[in-house]
Image (cartoon, helix red, strand yellow):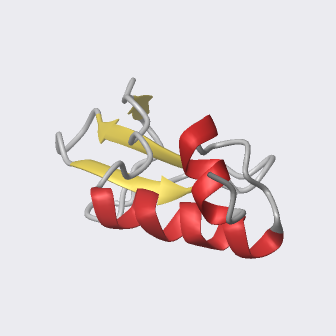
Amino acid sequence: MPLYDFRCQDCQLQFETLVRAGATPVCPRCGSASLDKQVCAPAPPGRSKAIIASARRQAAREGHLGNYTASERNKLLGRR
């Protein structure tokens, strides 16, 4: 079920809700079905150094070394 942002035309409440296919959402405040779907930007994936380091360690444990530089791969594989 996708998450959508809406604005109620009757009470002007802005809210987000999960919408099932074929379902008509209603305003949680007034119950109106007169809603405007809002355009919103998706949240970008996390890019913190801790997240990247964790993902690289997991990839190395699984044998996926494509996201390492050549010198880092050599160091991980014990090459000089």
Q: Residue at x 40, y 50 (%)?
A: 32
Q: Pinpoint residue 71: horizontal percent, then vertical percent.
A: 56, 42
Q: Pinpoint residue 34: horizontal percent, then vertical percent.
A: 42, 36
Q: Residue at x 49, y 44 (%)?
A: 4
Residue in front for this viewpoint, 77 or 12: 77
* Residue farthest toward the left in the current orientation of the protein: 12
Q: Residue at x 80, y 47 (%)?
A: 22
Answer yes or no: is residue 50 visible.
yes
Answer yes or no: is residue 2 visible.
no
Residue in front for this viewpoint, 39 or 50: 50
The correct choice, above or below, for 77 with respect to 40 in the image is: below
Q: Quadrant of the N terminus?
A: bottom right
The correct choice, above or below, for 1 with respect to 13 in the image is: below
Residue in front for this viewpoint, 17 or 70: 70
Q: Pinpoint residue 18: horizontal percent, then vertical percent.
A: 56, 59
* Residue farthest toward the top in the current orientation of the protein: 39
Q: Pinpoint residue 65: horizontal percent, then vertical percent.
A: 73, 52
Side of 5 where 2 appears, left or right: right
Q: Residue at x 30, y 40 (%)?
A: 8
